[in-house]
Image (spheres, helix red, strand yellow):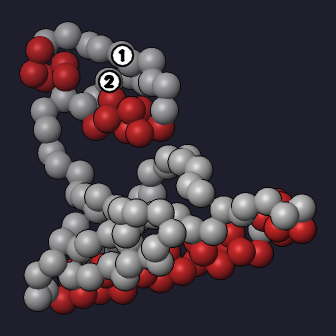
Amino acid sequence: YAHEHRCGVRVRGPGLTDAVTGTDPLKDALPLLEARPLDPSEAARETALLINAVSLAFTNALEAHPTNLARIAQGKASANCVLLRGCGARISVPAFAERHGWRGFMIAPTHIIRGIGISIGLDV
């Protein structure tokens, strides 16, 4: 049974690329996929290895988390993985003020929406 709680995961550093697959099998009750490079570059290979290591670290942290241990002891389902999908790279876009000549702001209900506002130079 899947509970959905969404978050953004930011992985950054030199030599990384968005040319990798995710770990989400896209169906419940299937094992996580391994991230794979989408091109033959060294950056894609290294990024896929990093994403797999991050995925394993999340799984290990959840497995040992006190809340999960308590839920398991009560016979309840536990959080057991973080699905990583949609790897991307931030693109360069003109700031809202630069494009429209106005200063803008945003009230953002989530961090993902907040990130979009920040990306185009809005006060959030």
* Quadrant location of the N terminus in the rendered image: bottom right
Left or right: where 38 falls relative to 30: left
Q: For this view, does 122 lie left or right of residue 79?
A: left
At a point 38% along the width and 78% down the height, the residue shown is 33
At x 65%, y 79%, the residue is 60
Is residue 66 in sight in this rendering? no
Tell me where residue 123 appears, x and y as whole percent: 38, 22
- Residue 75's quadrant in the figure? bottom right
Q: Tell me the residue at 47%/37% (across/down).
A: 111
Q: Is residue 96 visible?
A: yes
Q: Residue at x 45, y 18 (%)?
A: 107
- Which mark identifies residue 105? 1
For numbered disc 2, what is the local secondary structure?
loop
Mark closest to the chain's N terminus, 2 or 1: 1
**SS of the residue under disc 1:** loop
> Please, what is the three-letter code of the amino acid marked with disc 1?
Phe
Residue 86 in percent (x, y) is at 29, 58
Left or right of residue 48: residue 37: left
In this view, the residue in front, 83 or 118, is 83
Residue 122: assigned label: 2
Query: Along the line of sight, which residue is nearer the eye, 122 or 39?
Result: 39
Q: Which label belongs to residue 71?
A: none
Amino acid tagged 2: Leu
Mark 2 and mark 1 in contact? Answer it, CB < 8 Å: yes
Spatial separation of the CA atoms under disc 2 and disc 1:
5 Å
Quarter of the image where one finds residue 98 = top left
Dot 1 alpha-carbon crowd within 10 angstroms: few under 14, some 14 to 19, many 20 or more: few
